[in-house]
Image (cartoon, rainbow, N blue to C red):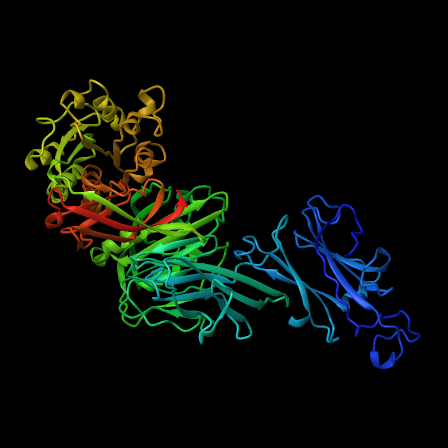
């Protein structure tokens, strides 16, 4: 047993190896040469090496570390005694190291190899060092595999010295498979060189064989559960240092597999719905490009400096992870900063936010309309977007994207983007889709499920299967009430007409869900219900939405909606909301709420009667007023939605979302795991009396994440008493 030479050190690993072939350099020999050929008859000694853990607060390593002790067994008793210690080397968690000068030549024989571990490694999220120990028995000055006696991982503590991640992402397609089925794992590696060693492993640590280091097809086992695969790379940086990284990906073997992809980034993974092919995204980016058309696998990134877009691509986007970079502290701040930088690079193009939604898990989702002075191809805009929003360092760049031959120049596009931010880890996950404006309707379901329903979770999160059973209710008995608050000041004529024109679209949507609805309208200067009060008469609703422009210039939408909804207010006195009915409040104004100017105390968006009663608020306002108004804050806190009042072309989609959410709240079948877990909406399978029902907004079912519910529509509405089974996967991470 090795002797602990310092009482303050804790012994970590003990290694003692007798190496008869190693000569004691400079001892027992007249020549002082270590060359065995010139030292016949010299006394041979045994070389020993051991390690001791240095605790936090150690005088040599403030944040702790490793001490490597080397010496010769002079008395040949197979014990390295205090008097036989020749030299030692310290390697600290902060990346610093030191070798005692006296006797340091022994480390030409007792070899210590230190390789850098990149950030986002499975062993060390912040990176670190891999210390490998052994004795050079063959005297080639290299620590061969057969000579390795021990290795120690020192994760970075106290200093940010580790290199950036080399493996940008791993994608599993699909991420949920049936027993014994196959899935394809694809890696994105920055600046892959032919000399780099890339190795895939299964969960048992067995090396897997593949002809393409960036892609491998694996077969799942026969048992339902989780299977883990690992990718390892060994490369050399510009300073000649060895850099290592490992990254893991988990696939789920399920009885009811879903066509879902998983993209593993640095600290998070993103689950994407069916309908995408991913492609390598290299440079200063941790992520992948997503295309809405299936494509042939693109060649390895190391063989090209640019990435071609597949032919006939109409929708593309990206999934990426990065830090805040410039000090933003919320998901919305990161979103706004990124989109602003993107807009500034589009040569005076108009990039107008049309809607903003804060999802229940805290993610921020926004839609933008892009109008260009000079037309561009989809890929050109995507390239600008990635370089301004997705790069993981200030001034970073990504590989150039090359437009497909089929792409045409367009002047109008729609950008949908969702940002999730973990302040503790300074990790932002950004998911986006970009599509030319005239193709939005073709991809509406895919856009929503990608940017509003996509799930971010920790990279080691697991998927679980849930089956919820229901007995169908009479959906026609479900009720949804709406209170519209319309600005009736002098500047509102056009907006009133626009919302009035959409009465049919609004009512058609809510009626398609088989929901009994009623609509009441007040103004921003009065709590008096217009017309005959609450009604479902289309003509009356359209008329109530146009209160005129002779109202007060002091627009107080929140105040008067509070007044109307309070106990003994005009809404309650009219008998609303009805028993069992959901209530949604829609406030439409082109001015700030002006609450503070006329009321004390200031309105608190996080403590109010809307939240107390479960009323969801939708705000149709000017974004420039949002910073000095509570309209958007109230919509956020009640899980509503905000629309840019100036973009009347988006009113139709907005009122349909309101109607859909109201239908889900009153007529939906709430998933049992939704309140505590992330639901993987792309995995949902619905059957009624044993027959599969397709996801379809007209005649099928839809999932509404804000209500965490399934709603049937049109001809697919089940008859009362039918057996409904909703099978789905959920992420075993707490919200």
The residue lying toward the viewer, choosing from 89 and 80, is 80
**Quadrant position of residue 498:** top left
Farthest-out residue, right = 30
The residue lying toward the viewer, choosing from 459 and 419, is 459
Can residue 84 be seen here? The reply is: yes
Pinpoint residue 81: horizontal percent, then vertical percent: 83, 57
On screen, residue 379 above or below 563: below
The residue lying toward the viewer, choosing from 482 and 478, is 478
Q: Is residue 654 left or right of residue 459?
A: left
Pinpoint residue 287: horizontal percent, then vertical percent: 43, 59
**Quadrant position of residue 141:** bottom right
Residue at the spot 20% in from the left edge and 20% down from the top edge: 569
Location of the N terminus (image quadrant): bottom right
Farthest-out residue, bottom = 37
On screen, residue 95 above or below 231: above
Q: Is residue 517 left or right of residue 76?
A: left
Q: Is residue 117 left or right of residue 526?
A: right
Residue at the spot 18% in from the left edge and 22% down from the top edge: 572
The residue lying toward the viewer, choosing from 593 and 225, is 225
């Amino acid at each position: 047993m090795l002797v602990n030479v310092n009482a303050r050190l804790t012994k970590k690993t003990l290694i003692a190896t007798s190496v008869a072939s190693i000569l004691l350099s400079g001892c027992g020999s007249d020549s002082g040469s270590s060359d065995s050929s010139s030292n016949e008859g010299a006394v041979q000694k045994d070389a020993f090496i051991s390690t001791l853990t240095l605790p936090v607060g150690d005088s040599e390593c403030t944040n702790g570390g490793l001490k490597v002790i080397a010496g010769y067994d002079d008395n040949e008793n197979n014990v390295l005694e205090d008097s036989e210690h020749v030299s030692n080397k310290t390697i600290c968690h902060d990346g610093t190291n030191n070798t005692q000068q006296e006797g340091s030549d022994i480390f030409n024989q007792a070899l210590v190899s230190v390789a850098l571990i990149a950030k986002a490694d499975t062993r060390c999220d912040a990176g670190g060092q891999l210390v490998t120990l052994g004795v050079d028995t063959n005297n080639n000055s290299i620590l061969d595999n057969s000579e390795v006696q021990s290795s120690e991982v020192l994760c970075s503590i106290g200093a940010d010295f580790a290199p950036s991640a080399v493996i940008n992402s791993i994608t599993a397609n699909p991420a949920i498979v049936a027993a014994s089925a196959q899935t394809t794992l694809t890696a994105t590696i920055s600046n892959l060189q032919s000399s780099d060693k890339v190795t895939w492993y299964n969960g048992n640590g067995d090396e897997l064989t593949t002809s393409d280091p960036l892609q491998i097809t694996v077969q799942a086992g026969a048992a339902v559960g989780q299977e883990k695969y690992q990718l390892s790379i060994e490369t050399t940086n510009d300073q000649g240092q060895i850099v290592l990284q490992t990254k893991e990906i988990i696939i789920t073997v399920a009885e009811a597999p879903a066509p879902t992809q998983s993209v593993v980034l640095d600290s998070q993974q993103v689950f994407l719905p069916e309908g995408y092919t991913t492609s390598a995204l290299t440079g200063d980016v941790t992520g992948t490009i997503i295309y809405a058309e299936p494509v042939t696998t693109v060649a390895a990134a190391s063989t090209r400096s640019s990435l071609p877009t597949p032919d006939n691509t109409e929708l593309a986007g990206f999934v990426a992870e990065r830090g805040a970079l410039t000090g933003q502290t919320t998901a919305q701040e990161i979103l706004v900063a990124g989109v602003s930088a993107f807009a500034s690079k589009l040569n005076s193009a108009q990039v107008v936010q049309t809607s903003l939604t804060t999802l229940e898990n805290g993610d921020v989702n926004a839609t933008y309309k892009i109008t260009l002075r000079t037309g561009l191809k989809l890929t050109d805009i995507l390239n600008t977007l990635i370089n301004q929003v997705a790069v993981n360092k200030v001034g970073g760049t990504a590989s150039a994207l090359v437009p497909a031959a089929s792409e045409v120049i367009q002047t109008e596009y729609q950008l949908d983007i969702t940002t999730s931010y973990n302040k503790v880890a300074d990790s932002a996950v950004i998911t986006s889709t970009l599509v030319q404006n005239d193709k939005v309707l073709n991809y509406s379901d895919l856009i929503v499920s990608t940017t509003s329903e996509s799930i971010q979770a920790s990279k080691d999160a697991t998927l679980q299967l849930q089956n919820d059973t229901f007995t169908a209710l009479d959906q026609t008995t479900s009720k949804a009430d709406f209170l519209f608050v319309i600005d009736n000041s002098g500047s509102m004529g056009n907006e009133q007409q626009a919302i009035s024109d959409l009465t049919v679209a609004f009512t058609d949507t809510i009626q398609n869900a088989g929901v009994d609805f009623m609509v009441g309208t007040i103004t921003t200067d009065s709590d008096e219900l217009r017309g005959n009060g609450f009604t479902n008469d289309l003509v009356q609703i359209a008329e109530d939405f146009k209160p005129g422009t002779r109202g007060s210039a002091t627009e107080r939408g929140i105040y008067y909606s509070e007044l109307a909804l309070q106990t003994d207010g005009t809404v309650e006195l009219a008998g609303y909301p009805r028993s069992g009915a959901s209530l949604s409040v829609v406030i439409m104004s082109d001015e700030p709420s002006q609450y503070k100017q006329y009321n004390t105390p200031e309105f608190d968006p996080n403590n109010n009667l809307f939240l107390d009663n479960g009323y969801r608020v939708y705000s149709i306002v000017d974004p420039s007023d949002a910073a000095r108004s509570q309209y958007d804050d109230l919509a956020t806190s009640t899980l509503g939605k905000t629309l840019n009042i100036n973009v009347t072309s988006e009113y139709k989609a907005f009122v349909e979302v309101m109607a859909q959410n109201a239908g889900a709240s009153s007529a939906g079948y709430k998933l049992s795991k939704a309140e505590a877990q992330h639901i993987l909406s792309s995995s949902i399978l619905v059957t009624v009396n044993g027959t599969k029902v397709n996801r379809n907004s007209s005649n099928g079912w839809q999932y509404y994440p804000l209500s965490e519910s399934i709603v049937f529509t049109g001809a697919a509405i089940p008859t009362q008493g039918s057996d409904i089974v909703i099978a789905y996967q959920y992420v075993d991470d707490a919200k």
